[in-house]
Image: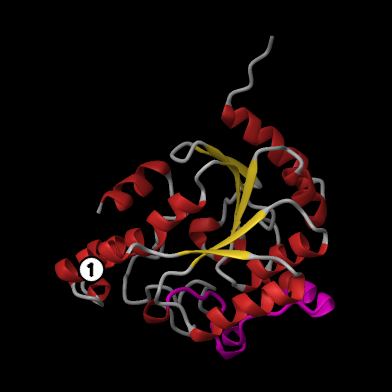
Amino acid sequence: MTVINPIQEAEALAAKLERLDLAGRLSLVAGLGGRVVFTTSLGIEDQVITAEIGTHRLPIDVVTLQTGRLFKETLDLIGETESQYDIHITRYEPEQADIDAYAAKYGMNGFYESVEARHACCSVRKLKPLARALEGATIWITGLRRGQSANRAETPFAEYDAERHLLKVNPLADWDIDAIKVFVADNGVPINPLHARGYPSIGCEPCTRAIKPGEPERAGRWWWEQDEKRECGLHVAEETASIVAQQ
């Protein structure tokens, strides 16, 4: 009996996904069994995935991390999306005790002062809620794309997340922003109005700005930091994510 390890399983799945369109990719993943979870930030690419899940009535749990610092436009879009696709988006919020502990140590907006403080804030408001959102999941679907940043240029269609012990699927890995916009226009997908105001990537309000002409899509995230590979910790290598989560 041949035993396939998780990494080989992910590679085999990636090869299958590469040959399918988006609906086919999501349908394949939904049919693999277990709890399948899609985490959405309500960004334009995530809205494309949500639209396909809702349109095809796929058995995929749609969840979002309601950090407590999101733009009003993002919060409004949650309800609009639920109504349009007749789905429920489960909100996962940070624990108040964690927020209080962070504020006591760093100040409520201490993330501007150091990378350590910013990582700690992301841990409280995103990483810990994500852990709850993924409890019992076998597959985690994301909206990661290779064109979003240099740090995401090698994003595979599927990979094994060793830290969380599940398959991580990125069905839009090969989509560029032009293809995303065409899909949105052709299918009447509701999107965040901030995209039209120069915000291609939208996170927490204090940590997101509009980008300048010629800047990468994610240049407006944590713009005061110099590291071009800056991330919140949700989508980084296991060893890096572990360090971030402990801060």
Nearer to us in this view, 41 or 116: 41
Residue at the limit of the structure toward the top, as seen here: 1
Q: Residue at x 59, y 72 (%)?
A: 43
In the image, 139: left or right of 107?
right
Name the image quarter holding residue 41: bottom right
Name the image quarter holding residue 90: bottom right
State the image coordinates of residue 9 (x, y, percent, origin top left): 65, 30
Q: Is residue 212 visible?
A: no
State the image coordinates of residue 157 (x, y, percent, origin top left): 66, 47
Q: Residue at x 27, y 72 (%)?
A: 111
The span picked out in magenta is 181-204
State the image coordinates of residue 52 (x, y, percent, origin top left): 77, 62
Residue at the limit of the structure toward the bottom, as seen here: 197
Q: Quadrant of the N terminus?
A: top right
Nearer to us in this view, 64 or 45: 64
The residue labelled by disc 1 is 100
Asked which secondary structure carries label 1, the reply is helix
Q: Residue at x 81, y 56 (%)?
A: 23
Name the image quarter holding residue 7: top right
Q: In this picture, is 193 found above or below 96?
A: below
Residue at the limit of the structure toward the left, as seen here: 105
Q: In this picture, is 55 found above or below 26?
A: below
Magenta segment includes 40: no
Query: What colouring does the structure picture have?
Result: secondary structure
Q: Residue at x 34, y 58 (%)?
A: 123
Q: In this picture, is 157 found above or below 200?
A: above
In the image, 213: left or right of 86?
left
Question: Hey, what amino acid is under mark 1?
Answer: Asp
State the image coordinates of residue 121 (x, y, percent, origin top left): 30, 65
Q: What is the crowding at mark 1: few (fewer than 14 residues within 10 Å), some, or many (at least 20)?
A: few
Q: Is residue 16 visible?
A: yes
